[in-house]
Amino acid sequence: MHVFRVWAPSAHTVNVVLPDVESDGGRQEVLTAAGATRYPMQRRPDGWWVAEVATAGPGTRYAFSVDAGPGRPDPRSPRQPLGVHGPSEVFDTTTYAWTDHGWPGRRIDGAVFYELHIGTFTPAGTFAAAIEHLDHLVDLGVDVVEVMPVAAFDGVRGWGYDGVDLYAVHEPYGGPGGFQQFVDACHHAGLAVCLDVVYNHLGPSGNYLSEFGPYFSDQHETPWGAGVNLDDAGRAQVRRWICDNALRWFEEFHVDALRLDAVDRLLDESGRHLLAQLSDETSALALRLGRPLSLVAESALNDPRMVEPTIAGGLGMTAQWSDDFHHAVHAWVTGEKHGYYSDFGDVETVARTLTVVFHRSPDSLPAAQDWPGDDPVPPVDPDRHRGHQFLACLQNHDQIGNRATGDRVAAAPADPAGATPDLLGRAAAGAAMVLTSPFTPLLFMGEEWAASTPWQYFTDFDPELGALVRDGRRREFAEHGWDRAEVPDPQDPTTRDRSVLRWDELGEGDHARMLAWYRALIALRRAEPDLRDDDLAAISVTTGPDWLVIHRGGLDVLVNLGAQPAVLPASPDAQVLLAWSGGTAAEPVAGGLRVPPDSAAVVRRPA
């Protein structure tokens, strides 16, 4: 026996449909077949409909028909075995035999994050295949595995940000059972798991929510159309749909943290923002479960109130991404200054983001124009904010994948003035700035060995929608000077295949050298209290034309991105702890330490 429930407040009738036929692969609507069995549902005063079906249980496939319409997947579908257009399936998450009973959880502030995409982390693109490489992450020194979205989306290949069944797990990855096994294996290896979730929009294919109720509202517009309904009629149940989803990942899948996509597009004028509600409910669940649970916000607002406690009027996030730090380091390392890098590129901007986090004024950002409230946004205050509340990275899925060809930093075009810098050395210097920063560092898969593979944008929509996506992407990049022919076709399966990591590279030449550098940097960060200190007031930076020295307690981080060796102001008696250029880096000379071009070193000042 199974009790089916669905919220459909304006419906006159709702039926549970148990189809007698199967989908042809997930894209054809077959749930209206004459052979399907229908069970009428009973309406409750709160707009929920309920039906008990004695013959249903785990493994039963079903759909809901609203007002005699076609059968649609459950808005809270626990599994979509035949794709997002096919029937839902009853799945009992409590039957999995967890082995992580001794897992205490872990705080994410200051932890080393590693962002990965299940579909391209390995050639197989499954949870089971990813488990085989967890030892690599442990050896690297990773603390938290951040998994890009796994909510069910249309097709087989995709980034995951077009998910439409947010309670289900993408079946080609291994489905909900496979994800439970992955989290369990991570905990067994000592790794926490952060799941990327998308609540600000749904994908364009397979989104049937509006047939059930007011999940979206024209009161707010977003880049994807009508905003998710957080403050209009019916909002209470829509907010519960989101919060219940988040709590489910924590409780039923043992996830340790959630990364919330583009929260600046969660437009909410209800009086109590959804993020504050979610923060308080997450804190209550953490107390009940007896382990820390964290929320990490991707925000384009540069608003430190994001990480302030709800009791003080903040939104209660554990941490937020710092795009300004990424942009500052990327633009200085690569020499790129077009598009959103136009406000960055000089060493002074890097120094500013290292000490005050944000470079741009919050009120000058486009996203701030849509954010509710008219109060001016305060700057980061070292007396109230800690460095570990901000995530810093040199590379991530957005900043690589949303380039025309998905090229990584070590392969990016640099210095349009005509010089030929050492891109590998510059990437190593960028890594040093991230991993010795006062922030919580994040790496993107393959970055640690300067992977030769790009990470490109790929999709698997139906041909008509796929053509629109392909043409729109090529048109967008053509407007920025790219040759349309150079922009990969997202629909072509080889675009995904090019993006799969090559694990056989790890022991080869420069790849092995970069991997050793990352391992050493992470080990040094873990060993040195000064590098774990997240007091923003305790960090200072000395800059020159093409170099900087980051002062971290008794340590100095020396970075020279000039075309020539430079003498940096540091004690000639300093002890070299790490040097990218080997024994020639940080050579004592009159006036300081001589550092080669496109290089970095970490030294300890004499007592």
Image (cartoon, rainbow, N blue to C red):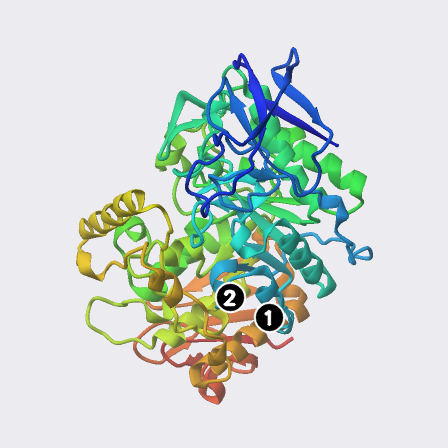
**Helix, strand or loop for disc 1:** loop
Q: Position of residue 394 (x, y in %)?
A: 45, 61
Extreme-front residue of the structure = 35
How many tags in the picture? 2
Answer few, some or many: residues within 10 Å of disc 2's Cα (few below 14, many 20 plus, some between 14 and 19).
Answer: some
Q: Position of residue 130 (x, y in %)?
A: 58, 65
Q: Are marks 1 and 2 in contact (CB under 8 Å)?
A: no
Q: Is residue 526 left or right of residue 593?
A: right
What's the distance in space between the residues labelled 1 and 2, CA to CA?
Answer: 12 Å
Q: Position of residue 484 (x, y in %)?
A: 18, 56
Camera-side residue of 538 and 279: 279
Q: Which mark is residue 133?
A: 1
**Which of the two marks, 1 or 2, is nearer to us in this view?**
2
Report which residue position mark 2 lands on: 124
* Amino acid type of the residue tagged 1 in the rendering: His
Please tell me which of labels 1 and 2 falls first in the chain: 2
Query: Toward which corner of the image does residue 406 lie, by quadrant?
Result: bottom left
Q: Residue at x 20, y 51 (%)?
A: 480
> From what the image shows, is residue 408 above or below residue 6?
below
Is residue 26 in view from this perspective? yes
**Helix, strand or loop for disc 2:** loop
